[in-house]
Amino acid sequence: MVGLFKQPKRHLKKLVRDGEYTEAITFGKNLESDYSDDSDFMFIMGSIYFIVDEPTKALAYFEKSFQLNSDDIEMLTLKTNVHLKLQQKDEAMDCCKRIIKLEPKNSEAKSLLDQLENI
């Protein structure tokens, strides 16, 4: 039973790996209602929109992924980048603080937070 649920996400990841972003978005949108409570699926979709430079759409998926799993460092990192792209400094700083709380030695988040605090 579990294999059946993993297969569509595996196909979605393969499309992304192969650079088939338009097809991945279409395929993902068709799966969205079935995976609305899957943080990994939301992360994948957010990542695709981030890659194709649609930060507003990416952020919606990262927000949903965050609601489902707020401890995902990789998602928080991309969410930070989306906030920066959208010039949302306070939200980016909040993401950095969350990353540091989860991973105190994360030098990238510390450095970025220092930069943002001095702007």
Image: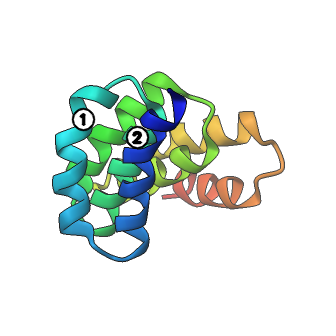
Could you tell me residue 106's position as x and y percent?
76, 53
Return the residue at label 2. Answer: 41
Q: Is residue 89 visible?
A: no
In the rendered image, the vertical position of residue 66 relative to residue 82, given as above or below: above
Q: Is residue 119 visible?
A: yes
- Answer few, some or many: residues within 10 Å of disc 2's Cα (few below 14, many 20 plus, some between 14 and 19): many
Write down the quadrant of residue 7 in the picture.
Answer: top left
Return the residue at label 1. Answer: 32
Q: Residue at x 21, y 48 (%)?
A: 57
Write down the quadrant of residue 38 in the picture.
Answer: top left
Q: Hey, which residue is sitting farthest right in the picture?
A: 105
**SS of the residue at dot 2?**
helix
Could you tell me residue 71's position as x and y percent?
63, 31
Between 10 and 89, the one nearer to me in the picture: 10
Is label 1 in contact with label 2 (beta carbons under 8 Å)? Answer: yes
Q: Amino acid at mark 2?
A: Phe
Q: CA distance from mark 1 to mark 2?
A: 8 Å
In the rendered image, the vertical position of residue 38 relative to residue 51, given as above or below: above
Between 112 and 76, the one nearer to me in the picture: 76
